[in-house]
Amino acid sequence: LVLADNWAHIDSVVSTYKFISKNKEMFWEEVEKHLQSKHVYGVRFALVVMLSYYVEEKYLDKIFNAVNNLELGEYYVSMAAAWLLSVCYVKFPNKTEKYLAHANIDNLTYNRTVQKICDSYRVDKQNKEKMKKSKRKI
């Protein structure tokens, strides 16, 4: 599994794995293995791979299920999940908003997701305001 010991290694290296684009179905098994990792950077690897190669309508439900089943208490996992979900929102706002309304994620990760959505230049002001109102009390 992943041997990285910090988030920067994961985030910079994953973008070079262009072979995943041509082997998504096959590589998904590897993503699922890393999601089960007890190592924080193994889980982050899986989330960043999803962010980089799987944010497509075909994989949205798999992404949402994966995030729902994670232990998100670790900062670097929570931030990667928020980043992933914010990109899902940018590309598929309606489906992601419906997911977020009932997401089984902790309040901190949810609010980080909302913040990343609001920080995006690709989300209009009206949707940012709507998302800000959905922030959870911590």
Image (cartoon, helix red, strand yellow):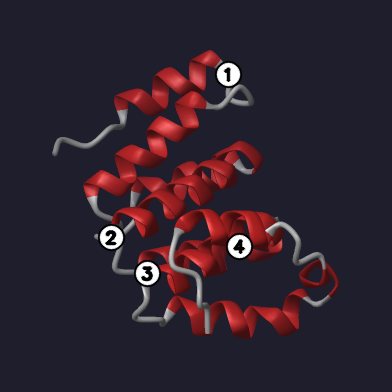
Please tell me which residue is depicted at 45% across the width and 53% down the height of the picture.
80
> Which numbered disc flags the more N-terminal residue, 1 or 3?
3
> 19 and 98: which one is in front?
19
Tag nearer the camera, 1 or 2: 2
Looking at the picture, which amino acid does disc 3 mark? Val
Q: Is residue 97 visible?
A: yes
Q: Are marks 1 and 3 in contact (CB under 8 Å)?
A: no
Q: Amino acid at mark 1?
A: Asp
Whether tag 4 and tag 2 are in contact, CB under 8 A, the answer is: no
Q: Which mark is residue 124?
A: 1
Task: Tell me the element at label 3.
Answer: helix
Q: Residue at x 49, y 48 (%)?
A: 85
Q: Residue 93: x percent and y percent?
A: 57, 38
Marks 1 and 2 sit apart, C-alpha to C-alpha, by 30 Å
Q: Is residue 58 left or right of residue 113?
A: right
Left or right, 58 with respect to 93, comes to right
| Location of residue 26 by image quarter | bottom right
Say few, some or many: other residues with alpha carbon within 10 Å of mark 4 (under 14 / 14 to 19 / 20 or more): many
Between disc 1 and disc 2, whose residue precedes?
2
The answer to whether the residue labelled 3 contacts the one labelled 2, judged by CB atoms less than 8 Å apart, is: yes
Name the quadrant containing residue 39.
Answer: bottom left
In the picture of the structure, the residue carrying the numbered disc 4 is 50
Kind of residue at disc 2:
Glu
Q: Quadrant of the C terminus?
A: top left
Specify which label sits upstream in the sequence, 4 or 3: 3
Point out which mark residue 46 bears. none
Numbered badge on residue 74: 2
What residue does disc 3 label?
A: 40
Q: Is residue 127 above or below residue 77?
A: above
Which is in the foreground here, disc 4 or disc 2? 2
